[in-house]
Structures are given as C-alpha cells and as structure tokens.
Amino acid sequence: MNWQNVLSIRLLDQSLIKVEIGVPIIILFVAWFVIFLLSKNRWRRLFEKWKVEKANIKLGGVGEISIKPDFEDIQIAHKAWVELATRKAGITFNEEYDVIIEIYDSWYKLFSEMRELTKQIPADRIRSSEDTQELVKLLVDALNNGLRPHLTKWQAKFRRWYTMELQKHPNKSPQEIQALYPDYKDLIRELKEVNKQMVEYTRFVKRISHGA
C-alpha cells in the first residue's frame, strides 16, 4: 500500500481481516485534532503558563498569598472579579453620596454569589491543586473573616435605627439621615477601613484574572 491509498481492507482468511490506513487519513485526522484543540481553546490550556501573582491581603487577615493560576483558575477569578467590580463592595466608599444600607446589601449579596461560585469548583480539583486551594481561600476566607465581623457588629442595630429614622425625617435624604446615627463616626471609620481592604482585594482578584 502506498501513501496515495486512503484505506485498504483485505480478508486474509476466514477469521482475519487486515486494515491499512493511508497517509492522507492520518494527515486528515491530525488536522482535525489541531482544529478541535484550537476551537475549544484547549491548545492554550495545554501550553500557556501564567506568572505567579503575589499580594499581602489585609482583608480577613489572609496575609501573604501566592497563586500561579492555570486556565481554570483564571476563569474562576474572572467570574469573582465581575461580581466584585459590579457591586459597591469593590468600589471606594463615598461618604457624601453612598448609602450605608446599600453597602450592606451589596456585601450580603456578594457572600451568596461567592459561595455559589466556589460550589462550582470540582472537589477533586481543590484536592489536587494548591493554587486552586489558595484561590478558594482568597474567595471564601477573606470575605468571611473580612466582611462578616463588621456586619455582625454594625448591620442589625444600624438597620433598626435607620428604619425608624426614615419615618421621622421624610424630607431628609438617606445620606442626611444616616449621618445622624449616634455612633456614625465609629461606624464610618470601620466601614471605610474594610472598604479600602475590599478595593485592594478586588484589584488582586483582577490581577489573577487579567494579569494586570
């Protein structure tokens, strides 16, 4: 059989069949496989490597963290960054215009979204990849230990007070009302500190996803 033959099937005896595949079939298969890898983005997954991203994450006391993401980690980080970047949690707090209740609502919803996101990560991948373990730690521990203490301390009592004050001051803006809170200065000071850490945290998640 020469290279021009595509496929040859011969019956040698009653129980034995000889099949020969020509060079064109092999070339066609290789070409199809390459196209498949490129179309599914698997080629990049196999050969492209991303640099190690390092940071000192103050939010939640995570501390020094180092992640060398692969394609799957980058996909996870991108989804997390979108959640952060499109919510008030990842944007610098503006005392003049922002409403505290809306900030707390944003933080609460962020918890839910991050929890759902981490649920989507296969357990075997978490067990087998240290970088994915670090990413999960970043997404879960930082929020649990960074946002939750502030919410536990302030949210319930501020909401209760704010709800009652809304009825008393129908002509005042939300920003004017919240400034009347007896412990406003302490609340704002702590909120701004957590918010600052959240902004830095959001930037690091973006670096894992976007590389810059």
Image (cartoon, rainbow, N blue to C red):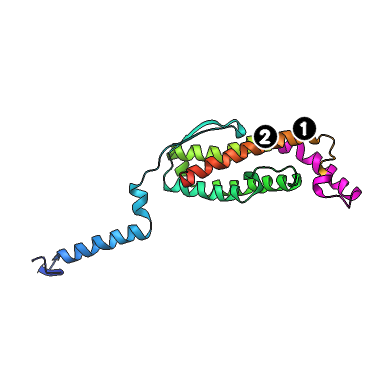
Q: Secondary structure at mark 1?
A: helix
Residue type, mark 2 in image? Glu
Residue 100 coordinates in the image, percent (x, y):
75, 44
Image coordinates of residue 5 in percent, x first then y, are 12, 69
Amino acid type at image mark 1: Asp
Which residue bears the numbered disc 1?
186
Residue 130 picture quarter: top left
- Tally the marks: 2
Element assignment for label 2? helix
Closer-to-camera residue (156/197): 197
Residue beneath disc 2: 193
Depth check, front residue: 124 or 210: 210
Q: Is residue 163 magenta?
A: yes
Extent of the magenta region: 150-177
User: Tag 1: Cα neighbours inside 10 Å, few (<14), some, or many (≥20)?
Assistant: few
Q: Earlier in the sequence, mark 1 or mark 2?
A: 1
Residue 136 sits inside the magenta stretch: no
Q: Is residue 109 left or right of residue 205?
A: right
The residue located at (19%, 65%) in the rendering is: 25
**Seen in the image, is 35 located left or right of residue 173?**
left
Residue 16 visible in the shown view:
no
Query: Residue lying furthest right in this view?
Result: 168
Magenta residues, dominant SS class: helix
Q: Nearer the viewer, residue 197 or 128?
A: 197
Above/below status of 42 relative to 161? below
Residue sitting at 57 percent across and 39 percent down? 201
Residue 185 coordinates in the image, percent (x, y): 78, 34
